[in-house]
Amino acid sequence: MTEKQGLYYKYCYEAGNIAAAAEKLYVSRSVVSRMLSDLEEEFDTVFFTRGKRGIVPTEAGKIMYKGICDAIEMQNELAKRLAALKE
């Protein structure tokens, strides 16, 4: 999983809708949909059930979201600590 894929995933999870996530990311719906499919293939699991009203995370999807949020938080904390060394 790339950083970009993680960000796209986070937007999808939070929006609950692929089209809304795509709009926020300024990309097409098909780009976001393909990225989700690629991640599901990479991890050999289904992260969202897709329906007419949007997407609903599976248990695996909830775990993935938590992991992505933790990774983003760790990256931000690392950046702060390294910036503090320069002060």
Image (spheres, grey):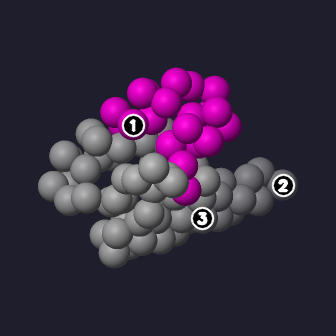
Residue 9 - label: none
Kindly identify which residue carries mark 2: 87
Residue 35 x/y as whole percent: 36, 37
Check if residue 81 falls in the magenta segment. no
Q: Which of these two is toward me, 84 or 24?
A: 24
Q: Establish if 48 lies above or below 18.
A: below
Q: Quadrant of residue 16?
A: bottom right
Q: Please give the name of the residue rendered at 50% of the width and 43% of the height, measured from the top-left corner.
A: 18
Helix, strand or loop for disc 1? helix
Helix, strand or loop for disc 2? loop
Residue 24 x/y as whole percent: 67, 37
Q: Is residue 44 left or right of residue 57?
A: left
Which secondary structure is most common in the magenta stretch?
helix
Q: Report the magenta residues as a range.
A: 16-35
Amino acid found under the numbered disc labelled 3 = Glu
Please tell me whether mark 3 or mark 2 is closer to you in this view.
3
Counting residues from the start of the chain, the first of labels 3 and 1 encountered is 1
Q: Please give the name of the residue rendered at 36% of the width and 58% of the height, measured from the top-left corner.
A: 48
Kindly identify which residue carries mark 3: 73
Considering the image in quadrants, where does the C terminus appear? bottom right
Residue 33 - label: 1
Helix, strand or loop for disc 3? helix
Q: For mark 2, does the 10 Å Cα neighbourhood hold few (<14), some (14 to 19), or many (20 or more) residues? A: few
Amino acid found under the numbered disc labelled 1 = Ser
Residue 58 x/y as whole percent: 34, 69
